[in-house]
Image (tube, rainbow, N blue to C red):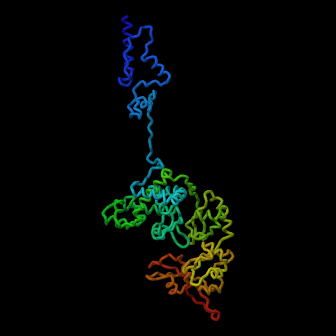
Amino acid sequence: MTYKTLAVGIILFLSSACLPHPGSLPETPLSPPPSAKEEVSLLKPTESEDVSSQEIPPPPEEPSPPHSPSPTGNPLASSLDFPISDEANDDFSFEVIPKDRPKSKQEFDIPIVINAKVEQFIQYFQMRGRKPFSNWLARSERYIPFMRNLLKESGLPEDLVYLALIESGFNPYAYSRAKASGPWQFIYFTGKRYGLTSNWWIDERRDPEKSTIAAAKYLKDLYDMFECWYLAAAGYNAGERKIATAMKRYRTEDFWELTKYRYLKRETKDYVPQMIAAALIAKDPEKYGFFGIEYQEPLRYEKVKVPEVTDLRLIAQACEVTLDEIKELNPELSRGCTPPSFPDYEIKIPFGKKELFSKNFETLYSGERFQFKTHLVKKGDTFSNIARLYRVDIEPILEMNRLNKRSHLAIGMNLLIPLPKDQGPKPDRTARKKSGGTDHGSNPVGTTTYTIKKGDTLWSIANETGVNLGALSRWNNLYPEKKLMPGDKLKIEMTKISDPPEESGKKRVGKK
């Protein structure tokens, strides 16, 4: 009897430890200890039936960690939110993240500040500027991959690529009212300072690769000067002197502080917020409502070297592609050929065509070399007169210079004249006399130089030296936009000029 009483007491003690704490279940009076023949049950028959019908999983052996209260106030519900595994979790795995791991799409390597001005431009791109910005995004993937690589190779943040997004929308042919050109919008003198050639034949500011390299150099110089990417970006827009003067005047190195004053133009004040807004949208367009953007394929090309003044149609023929494909890969070429004075010009051709080009070009070039001549438009010139002067049709002249019959010929304009392969670059004798050119009897004997003085113009130099204005421009690769700088030297060819027929027995030396 004593043994049975002790056993029942132990069972009741252990059972009480498993029961919920007071208050969690309604209190019920304890029943008298069961006899040895009865099964021990902690719940009433009705309660045990309810529990078995609901099939509640067994509770964990150890109490679960505390959770936040569930909305319904049921502690069971909150405990089921985070089930605990019965298996041991002693084996931890540590992931070593390398320093040079690739950044996720939403990470930035330039400082990102979201303020009222940035939100204003985000809203503008979403609403009024939605259509052009969608076009910029579609075009961006064509250029961003290789531009990022070029910036990285220069040791710069890759996200600076979004400067080109707000500068030009990644349009190589973009041209501003300030005469800035290309995807990075270089003006002539800044482009020249960073190695970009710009003349009548070629404008390397439009070359996506060369202009990105130049932009990287310029941005690096700006950052070395200001040690702040916001100020560097503002300097890229307004010029470093403007930003340096503003910093000195208002005694601050904070870009956002400088925007509070009137000294900087509104365009410059808005430049950095625009860049931040454009970068935020471009990295996650769906987040800002830009769905279904049809991105262009990344630009892929190979480079081959060709002789100077090589017709682009010949290059397209050697690659067995269209002329438009070659022009699209080489937007820096302003005429339908490679520039003179570049004997081994590297031209871009479609990726995978290099072997085919090498196979075809040698045969095509040796048999069908094109010749070109430049013509400086003078007063009274018309397309018909020029075509008659060089004994060619009007259509090739118009096509080569991207003109039509209604185009206006301005005095001083340079025209590229394509000549048939069986015709030399010399017009007939009558036409040459009308155009003020030299006679067929001229033979080169040497060159001399002329040092430009202050106030000189091409016209005054031509009159002073007694040479043809068009020839002077052609010898020195001049073009209408080029300014003459005092101290620069011009090349002048010396020739033997035949005397009139009645004095044909004598020769004299003069300037061509």
Q: Which image quarter holds the C terminus?
A: bottom right
* Vertical arrangement, residue 118 with respect to residue 314, above or below: above
413 vs 296, nearest the viewer: 296
Front residue of 198 and 185: 185
Q: Residue at x 40, y 58 (%)?
A: 117
Where on the picture, by quarter, is residue 321?
A: bottom right
Q: Can you give x and y, in whole percent of width and height, for residue 10 in the image? A: 37, 13
Regarding residue 20, the answer to whether it shows in the image is: yes
Q: Residue furthest bottom?
A: 502
Q: Nearer the viewer, residue 412 or 4?
A: 4
In the image, residue 72 sits, relative to residue 148, either above or below, namely above
Note whether residue 154 is visible: no
Q: In the rendered view, would you say 351 is above or below 433?
A: above
Q: Quadrant of residue 417?
A: bottom right
Q: Residue at x 65, y 86 (%)?
A: 429
Q: Position of residue 468 (x, y in %)?
A: 56, 84
Q: Is residue 241 left or right of residue 460?
A: left
Left or right of 374? Residue 64 is left
Where, quadrant-wise, is the N terminus in this rendering?
top left
Extreme residue toward the top, this view = 1
Q: How many marks?
A: 0
* Front position in the image: 169 or 99: 169
- Whether residue 332 sits left or right of residue 99 in the image: it is right
Identity of the residue drawn at 45% across and 8% down: 37
> How far across and how far down the image is residue 64, in percent?
40, 29
Picture coordinates of residue 511 (x, y %)?
Answer: 55, 86
